[in-house]
Amino acid sequence: MPKVDRRIIKTQESLKKALIELMTKKNFDDITIQDIADHADLNRGTIYLHYQDKFDLLDKLMEAHLNELGEIDEWACKLDWNDALIPYFEYFERNYLFFSTMLASTGVPAAFRTRLLASFIEGFKGEVDRESGRNTEIIEEVMLQYAGTAYAGIIEWWIKSGMPYPPKVMAKQVGILLGRTL
């Protein structure tokens, strides 16, 4: 795989950061390509070298975060609930601006919550306890929707509330709840 020029990566990161910062001040629909260019201190044409439009930029930004969460899935799912959730909550904390903006937004960015929920549900597949007999009467799809929605909701609450508890505390609390549920 060819190595990507660091200048390209730096430019793309600058554009993503500019978009998120603008979204904290303006509705996504009201943000123009010129706004993004001005905020990133780049030319309009530079944006079009990397993205088709602001929707493509937003989509790539969402995709990057979902991919990073997916990378955590690959190894964290092998741990018990409490330990597995710590890296997720630390990730949400490190990327507070992104998640607080995306989870508070309406309109186009609201699709992020739907994609995040779908990734949680996918991650919970195979986690439903059928061996103990406690979930035998629950349809797996219902259980996955319930657990995924609860997890997404608690993350949204935590972020919108200004992260009142540290990631390790949240991981333990949510781990206990998910362990009881799944």
Image (tube, rainbow, N blue to C red):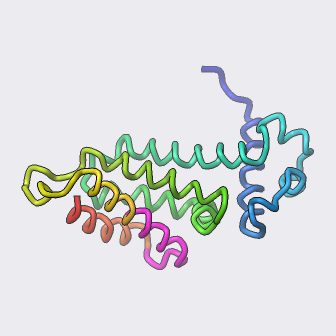
Residue 4 at x, y = what percent? Answer: 69, 29
Q: Residue 145 placed where, x, y %?
A: 34, 57
Q: Position of residue 121 (x, y in %)?
A: 37, 51
Q: Give the position of the C terminus as an image quadrant.
A: bottom left
Seen in the picture, residue 92 relative to 74 is either above or below; the reply is below
Placement of the N terminus among the 4 image quadrants? top right
Say above or below: 114 vs 122.
below
Q: In this view, does 11 lie above or below 96?
A: above
Q: Residue furthest top?
A: 1
Comparing 98 with 130, the one in front is 130
Which image quadrant is residue 98 in?
bottom right
Count of numbered marks: 0
Q: Is residue 175 left or right of residue 2?
A: left
Q: Is residue 155 above or below residue 32?
A: below
Given residues 54 and 1, the one toward you in this image is 54
Percent across and percent down for residue 66 are 52, 47
Tell me if residue 155 is in the magenta stretch.
Answer: yes
Q: In this view, does 134 lie to the left or right of 58?
A: left
Identify the residue at image location x=59%, y=44%. Answer: 64
- What residue lies at 77% left-to-right and 70% top-to-bottom? 25
In reply to whether residue 113 is colored magenta, the answer given is no
* Magenta range: 151-165
Please report the residue visible at 37 percent of the width from the left and 40 percent of the height from the top.
74
Q: Quadrant of residue 172?
A: bottom left
For the stretch drawn in magenta, the main secondary structure is helix
Residue under the point 25% across and 44% down: 126
